[in-house]
Amino acid sequence: MERGIYVVATPIGNLGDITHRAVKVLSDADYIAAEDTRQTRKLLDHLGIDTKMIALHEHNEREKANYLVGLVADGACVALVSDAGTPLISDPGHHLVQCARANDAPLFTIPGPCAVIAALSISGIACGSFIFEGFLPSKSGARRLRFEGLSEESRTVVYYESPHRILETLALLAEIYPERLIAVARELTKTFETVLSGASSDVYARVADDPNQRKGEFVLVISGAQVEESQGSLSPDDKRLAKRISADLPPKKAAALTADLYGLNKKSVYEFLVKGV
Ligand code: SAM
């Protein structure tokens, strides 16, 4: 294996989701930098791997990053893992990768599971254009401000949310945007995987009625604002995409395709393409 830092995705529940490359890298690496060595030990035991681990978590990452990049400079292969899914995605690893880039240490991705992408892919909500905001703030006032800021956001928005706050968060969404299409993806790839989708007020009622729907790990997917909500405006990026697609297609087809791919209002895209407004 070539010396370097290998950013390795691990399962988000079902251990069968580990990739062949991940197994090979974890077993051939000189060291595994792990967010929580006890958690990663369970995965390594399952895979029959005994590579030496080094703890790398949010409290020691800055200091450990230099040390690990130094090991790579001396010829080592270091695999970085988090407790679940893709490192750096709401997980430690940014300082290590930044330090490796700054020191020209080779970096490799070993891609795999990630809860944001897994949730989006089965949410039924437009995935052509989305933003991922990590965890919602824990204070309810700050969460309200975040949601109020979405009134003109036409892209799909994805958050991670904890089981302690999911009901309160859904109540807030139902109050501010009762008709907005949302999906609550719970326990993905695990025994109790569930995706509840529909108008936010309906999803809230279903979660309020069933305490089991408040247990586990959650991804919250919120559809973008319809054009009526955002006063018909297309962003400069939306307009550029529509123009590019219309270069190869008649306006009606280009509008339908752009709207579908990027979660936009078909009529607004069509009007922009034919009238330029
Ligand atoms: N790095 C991870 C990734 O690639 O998805 C995310 C780490 S973040 C600390 C953990 C959060 O991701 C959980 O609180 C939950 O919101 C979401 N998550 C992780 N696994 C999940 C799963 N199996 N089902 C639903 N959400 C999950």
Image (spheres, rainbow, N blue to C red):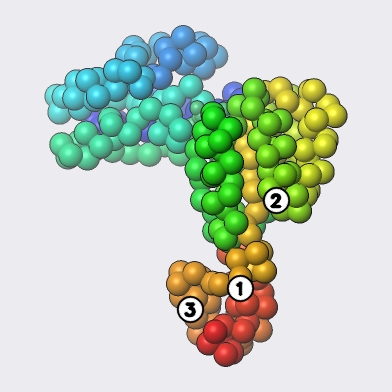
| Amino acid of disc 3 | Arg
Q: Residue at x 67, y 69 (%)?
A: 228
- Of circles 1 and 3, the one toward us is 1
Q: Tell whether 139 sits left or right of 25.
A: right
In the picture as drawn, the residue positioned furthest to the right comes out as 209
For marks 1 and 2 on the same chain, the one whose residue lies earlier in the sequence? 2
Secondary element type, mark 3: helix
Q: Check disc 3: other Cα within 10 Å, few if <14, some if 14-19, many if 20+.
A: few
Instruction: Say which element carries label 1.
Output: loop
Q: Is residue 263 above or below residue 210?
A: below
Residue placed under numbered mark 2 in the picture: 177
Image coordinates for residue 77, horizontal then vertical, percent: 27, 26
Q: Residue at x 77, y 28 (%)?
A: 213
Image quarter (top left, top right, bottom left or bottom right) of the C terminus: bottom right
Tell me which corner region of the image, top left, top right, bottom left or bottom right, holds residue 163.
Answer: top right
Q: Which residue is mark 3?
A: 244
Label 1 to label 2, Cα distance in Å? 18 Å
Q: Assign the N terminus to one quadrant of the image.
A: top left
Ligand 1 is found in which quarter of the picture? top right
Query: What is the secondary structure assignment of the residue under circle 2?
Result: loop
Residue beneath disc 1: 232
Image location (x, y in percent) of residue 11:
55, 28
Image location (x, y in percent) of residue 138: 54, 29
Label 1 to label 3: alpha-carbon separation: 20 Å
Which is nearer the N-term, disc 1 or disc 3? 1
Q: Is mark 2 within 8 Å of ligand 1?
A: no
Q: Quadrant of residue 252?
A: bottom right
Residue under the point 25% across and 24% down: 62
Q: Estimate how packed mark 2 is, as few (under 14), some (14 to 19) or many (20 or more) residues with alpha carbons within 10 Å.
A: some
Three-letter code, disc 2: Tyr
